[in-house]
Image (cartoon, grey):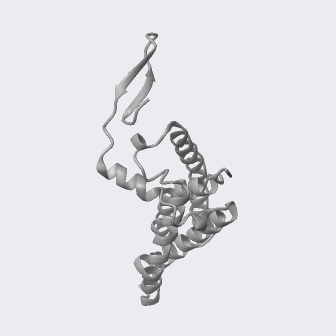
């Protein structure tokens, strides 16, 4: 099977080859970028990958909290400065995780092999299950705060939705970063 083609089972007629969009120069550049070896030492072991994923989660939580303070809270200047200060290290750690996964979630499907496509689907499915649990916990938490506590739910909905949206967006990256296996030894 060549790049840009995909095997599909026909309706009892055997395998049929279906043309998919060709691999573009952009795809080639992104594939080369995601598979560079210069930063491999940063994510060479499972412990290092877990540390980067954990750091990414912590920076994301801190950024979302600060952003919620700026947008929905008291509009504190320190929160905006903290959000902006976290942006560059957050981008660096995102790049390390993308490098560790070899661009599994960033590359188009036409440049990934069958194993990578299966890994991407597995990471997305696991992230979907985790995000569903997070949505349930958020809904129960907001509902419980409104029912049991003396809290106006209207003031909680937007910040909680912002936090859950960020988790939904990044959960596949975190799961894929934790699922990466070590490179085989020579």
As rendered, which of 79 and 2 lies closer to the eye? 2
Q: Give me the residue at 43% from left, 10% from top.
A: 13
Q: Is 120 above or below relative to 168?
A: above
Q: Nearer the viewer, residue 172 or 6?
A: 6
How many numbered dots are placed on residues in this image?
Answer: 0
Residue 153 visible in the shown view: no
Q: Residue furthest bottom?
A: 77
Q: Position of residue 33 (x, y in %)?
A: 42, 59
Q: Residue at x 35, y 49 (%)?
A: 27
Pick the residue in front: 51 or 139.
51
Task: Work out whether 65 lies above or below 27.
Answer: below
Above or below, 52 relative to 134: below
**Residue depicted at 44% across the width and 29% down the height:** 1
> Horizontally, is 27 left or right of 103 in the view?
left
Q: Is residue 69 above or below residue 113?
A: below
- Left or right placement of residue 80 versus residue 129 in this view: left
Place residue 174 in its image quadrant. bottom right
Residue 179 image offset from top left, x and y in percent: 63, 52
Q: Is residue 165 visible?
A: yes
Q: Position of residue 50 (x, y in %)?
A: 65, 64
Give residue 120's position: percent from left, percent from top: 52, 45
Q: Residue furthest top?
A: 12
């Amino acid at each position: 099977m060549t790049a840009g083609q995909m095997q599909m089972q026909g309706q009892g007629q055997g395998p049929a080859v279906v043309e998919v969009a060709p691999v573009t120069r952009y795809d080639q550049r992104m594939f080369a970028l995601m598979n560079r070896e210069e930063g491999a030492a940063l994510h060479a072991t499972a412990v290092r990958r877990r540390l980067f994923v954990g750091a990414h989660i912590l920076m994301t939580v801190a950024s979302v909290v600060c952003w919620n303070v700026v947008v929905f809270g008291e509009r504190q200047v320190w929160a905006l400065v903290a959000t902006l200060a976290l942006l560059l290290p957050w981008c660096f750690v995102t790049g390390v995780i993308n490098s560790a996964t070899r661009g599994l979630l960033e590359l188009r499907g036409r440049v990934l092999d069958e194993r990578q496509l299966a890994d991407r689907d597995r990471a997305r499915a696991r992230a979907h299950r985790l995000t569903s649990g997070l949505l349930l916990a958020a809904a129960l938490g907001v509902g419980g705060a409104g029912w049991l506590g003396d809290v106006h739910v209207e003031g909680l909905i937007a910040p909680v939705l912002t936090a859950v949206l960020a988790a939904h967006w990044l959960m596949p990256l975190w799961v894929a970063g934790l699922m990466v296996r070590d490179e085989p030894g020579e």
